[in-house]
Amino acid sequence: MLRERRPRVLRHPAQVVVAGFAGAVLVGTLLLMLPVARSGTDWTDPLTALFTATSAVCVTGLVVVDTESYFSTFGEVTILALIQVGGLGTMTLASLLGLAISRRLGLRARMTAAAETKAVGLGDVRSVVVGVARTSLVVEAVVALALGLRFWLAYDYSPGRAAYLGVFHSVSAFNNAGFALWSDSLIGFVTDPWICLPIAFSVILGGIGFPVILEVRRHLRTPRRWSMHTKMTLWATLVLLVLGTVVVTANEWRNPATLGQLDTPGRVLAGFFQAVMPRTAGFNSIDYGAVNEGTLLVTVVLMFIGGGSAGTAGGIKVTTFVLLFFVIWAEVRGERDVQAFERRIGDRVVRQALTVALLSVGLVVTATVVMVELTGLRTAVVLFEVVSAFATVGLSTGITADVGTPAQLMLVALMFVGRLGPITLVSALALRERQRLYHHPEGRPLIG
C-alpha cells in the first residue's frame, strides 16, 4: 500500500524565523520597485530595491542611493515599516497578531516566538512578546516627541515635517537601523545635544536587548536579583561605551576633518556619539571617510562585538565577547570551570560562544578577501564595510554605492546572515538534531 507523501514543512522555529525574514525582504523589494516608491516616474532597479529592503529589514542602514532624494514619501514609509518589522522581528509581530485574534498561542507559535525573543522558557513568551511591543512603542514615542519638538523649534521645519522627521529617526534609532533623511546622515547636527543624545540613548536601549530592559524594569530597585545575563550585558555595555568614547575622541581630537574643527563640548559629544553608533546603529555625525586609521580599527572592533542579545543590535553580541574573556581568564589561571558573576558557565554555552565567534571571524575574513579582489580597494576600508554589513551597523566610508554589483550582492548576503546570526542560520538548515550514542576515547592534541 502506497503512503500518501505529505508536503514538507518547516518544523524548526529557526527555520520559520529565517523564512519570515526572507519573506519580509522579498515583499519590501517588490514594494520599493514600484514607481510610486521613487521620486519621479521611473522604476527602482531590482538590485537597489533588494539592497535597500535587506538593509531595512536587517536594520543595518547601508545604502546605495540617497534615501531622501531617491525615494518618495511612500518609499520612505515603506522603509520605515520594514525597519520596524525587522527590529521587532517578523515572528514577534506574527505572534502579536495571533494574540490579538485568539488571545492565546499554540505550542509551535510559542516556540517560534521563543526563538526570536530568546525567552528563557515557553511559559513567559506571551509576556515577553507583549513587553517587547510596549517597550518599543513607548521609547519610540518619547524620542519622536523630543526630536520633533527640536526640529520644529530650532530648525524651522513645519510642525508636520518635524513630526515626520522625529518619528522616522526615532524608529530608525531604537531599532538600530541608522537610516537618515539627510545625505550626510547627522553631520549637520554634530554639536546639537538635543538631537544627538536622544538618538544615542534610544540606540543604547534598543541595543542592550529586550530581556535586559524588561528585567531591569521589573527589578529596578533590587539589582541583586538581576540575572547573570543582565549584569554581563550592562557592565560590558558601560565599559565599551566609556573606552570607545575615550579612544575615538583622543584619536580624532586634532583631526581638522572630523573633531578638530569643533569646540571642546562638541568634540566630547561627537566622540560619545561615534562610540555609541558602532553598537550597530549606523548614524554618524562625522565623516568616516576622513577619520584616522586607528579610529577605523577601533570602530571595526566595536562593530564586530555589537550589542546585547535578543535586541535590535547585531555583531557577535557583548555576552559572547565577555564570556570568551572569562574563558581565557579561567584557562590562564588553570581553573577547570569558567565562572562569572558568582555563577558557573556550562560547557555547552562556552562551545556556543566559541562557535559564534569563530564562524563570524571566518565569514568576515573570507568576505573581506573576496571583496578586496573584486573591488581592488584598500583592505582597511573593505574590512570596515564588511564588518558593518555583517554586524548590521550601517556605517560606511562612502564606498557602498561604488563597489559594483557582485560586491553589493555579497553585502546583501552578509546583512541577512548577520541579522539572523550564524547559529540560527545553521540551525535553520539542519533537518534534525543528532545525538551521538557512543563516545570515542579521549585524545589530547598539542596546543600552541
Image: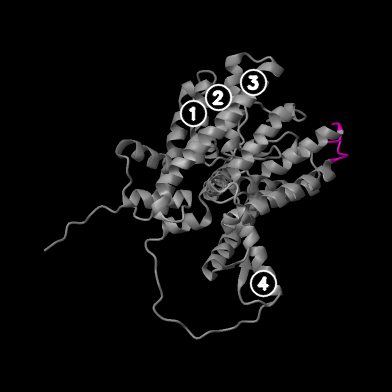
Q: Is residue 196 magenta?
A: no
Q: Which labelled disc corresponds to residue 78?
A: 1
Q: Position of residue 16 (x, y in %)?
A: 39, 49
Label 3: which residue?
149
Label 4: how many Cα within 10 Å (few below 14, some 14–19, many 20+): some
Of circles 1 and 2, which is in front? 1
Decide which of tag 1 and tag 2 comes sooner along the chain: 2
> What amino acid is at disc 2?
Phe
Label 2: which residue?
71
Q: Position of residue 399 (x, y in %)?
A: 68, 39
Which residue is outermost to the front?
Answer: 221
Residue at 47% x, 83% y: name it: 440
> What amino acid is at disc 3?
Leu
Decide which of tag 4 and tag 2 comes sooner along the chain: 2
Q: Position of residue 60 (x, y in %)?
A: 58, 40
Label 1: how many Cα within 10 Å (few below 14, some 14–19, many 20+): many
Lateral position of residue 390 relative to residue 248, left or right: left
CA–CA distance in space, label 1 to label 2: 10 Å
> What amino acid is at disc 4?
Ala
Q: Circles 3 and 4: CB distance less than 8 Å?
A: no
Q: Is residue 364 above or below residue 272?
A: below
Coloring scheme used: one colour
Q: Circles 2 and 3: CB distance less than 8 Å?
A: no
Residue at disc 4, secondary structure: helix
Magenta residues, start to end: 253-263
